[in-house]
Amino acid sequence: MHPYQKPTNADLAAAENQTVPDIIAPELNVLFCGINPSVYTAAVGHNFARPGNRFWPTLYQAGFTPHLFLPHEDKALLTYGYGITNVVARATVSADQLTGEEIKEGGKHLKAKVLEYKPLVLAVLGVTVYRKAFGYKQAAIGLQEHVIGNTRIWLLPNPSGLNAHYTPTAMATVYQQLRLYLDNDIKSK
């Protein structure tokens, strides 16, 4: 599908339960981890593609990218040491269609992926999904105490436009805390 072509209703229906490939490489600085792809993302084949999703503007405002990436530029994140995956690979209309068992199973797959690829930081985009996937019921935004191998875990707000708890400015500020942590961590090595 052309990067600027909007998917049809038929495209969206066909994308339900499909997957979107990870953008991943060994030893990334950050592996950003969404809950699961939307059917819009699956239909166009690029991460965080749904209009209204604030992932790309937030990355730019927080200083992760030198310009505002469009979803079809998602693979270029690897150039900057960042990747994208999801807790659950299956595309749905809404994340609330995922079962608790799917999320727990996704957490196991995510742990294995992190142990294989060894990013410096796993940034999980959504506190609730993290709590369900890993069983840390008191987890909150920010750096977590537990690690996977040598990978630190950082919780960030879900960038979905449906997450009204964070304004765009507040979201960028929280994401920027991770970037500053990385800047300090990388410089200290």
Image: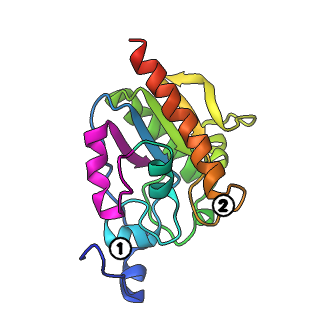
Mark carried by residue 126: none
The residue sitting at 38% across, 11% down in the picture is 189
Image color mode: rainbow
The residue sitting at 56% across, 56% down in the picture is 159
Between 63 and 108, which is closer to the camera in this rendering?
63
Q: Secondary structure at mark 1?
A: helix
- Location of the N terminus by quadrant is bottom left
Three-letter amino acid code of the residue under disc 1: Ala
Q: Relative to residue 48, is residue 109 depicted above or below?
A: above
Bounds of the magenta segment: 65-86
- Around disc 2, counting alpha carbons within 10 Å, would you say few (fewer than 14), some (14 to 19), or many (20 or more)? few
Give the residue pinned by disc 2. Answer: 163
Give the residue furthest to the top.
189
Across the whole image, how many numbered discs are drawn on residues? 2
Percent of width and height locating residue 163: 66, 60
Q: Relative to residue 139, is residue 67 depicted above or below?
A: below
Q: Is residue 67 visible?
A: yes
Between 17 and 164, which is closer to the camera in this rendering?
164
In whole angstroms, how far apart are the C-alphas of marks 1 and 2?
22 Å
Percent of width and height locating residue 161: 59, 65
Q: Is residue 133 visible?
A: no
The residue sitting at 38% across, 74% down in the picture is 15
Residue 141 falls in which quadrant of the image? top right
Q: Is residue 181 magenta?
A: no
Q: Earlier in the sequence, mark 1 or mark 2?
A: 1
Give the residue pinned by disc 1. Answer: 43
